[in-house]
Image: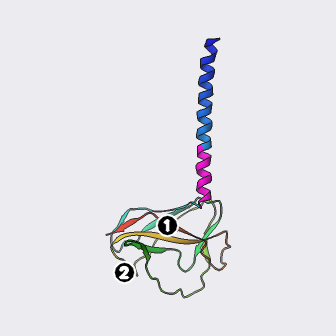
Amino acid sequence: MKKFIIPVILIIIVLVLITGCVAWKGYQIKKGKERGASIISTYQTEYAEGENPRIKINNNTDKTICFSSCYPYYLEKDDGSSQAYNYGSCPYADVAQPCMKPGDVKAFEILLDKMKIDKGTHRIAVPACVDCALQESFRRDEWFYSNEFVIK
């Protein structure tokens, strides 16, 4: 009888641990979706002056997100508080374009060659509309932010 009790207890402990790990992973995924976790990251943490940062956006939400056709991103400098650079006015209609479905990943280069960019710590701020249609008027429902990076 004692020969069977120890293996049964070990099997129960292993099953409890496996169930706990699966439940924790499900909880983490659910919390990420509740927060609207779209992850934006730069390919590097440092860029030379005049170099264009490259970013990758992972749509980890369960909704389609769309970006502005006029200003799909803002470059912000951290000088105690994040301040966006002034881009001027947009010469055409601001519509939702491009869009990303849940699970999509997009990468692109931020073109800074026509701007005077200060050296220092920066981040990319991306306004997005949630569940809007392609080409409809853009509205800012959420902001997503990249990691901080340095322009030398």
Q: Residue at the left extreme?
A: 152
Q: Amino acid at mark 1?
A: Tyr
User: Looking at the picture, does residue 10 appear above or below residue 28?
Assistant: above
Q: Please provide percent x and percent y for residue 128.
A: 58, 71
Q: Secondary structure at mark 1?
A: strand
For the point 36% across and 81% down, the residue is 116
Tell me where residue 43 sits by quadrant: bottom left
Residues drawn in magenta: 24-35
Q: Secondary structure at mark 2?
A: loop
Q: Distance of mark 1 from mark 2, alpha carbons?
A: 21 Å
> Magenta stretch: residue 31 in it?
yes
Q: Which residue is mark 1?
A: 145
From the viewer's perspective, is 8 left or right of 73?
A: right
- Closer to the chain start, of discs 1 and 2, is 2
> In which quadrant of the rendered image does the C terminus lie?
bottom left
Instruction: Give the numbered dot on residue 116.
Output: 2
Q: Amino acid at mark 2?
A: Lys
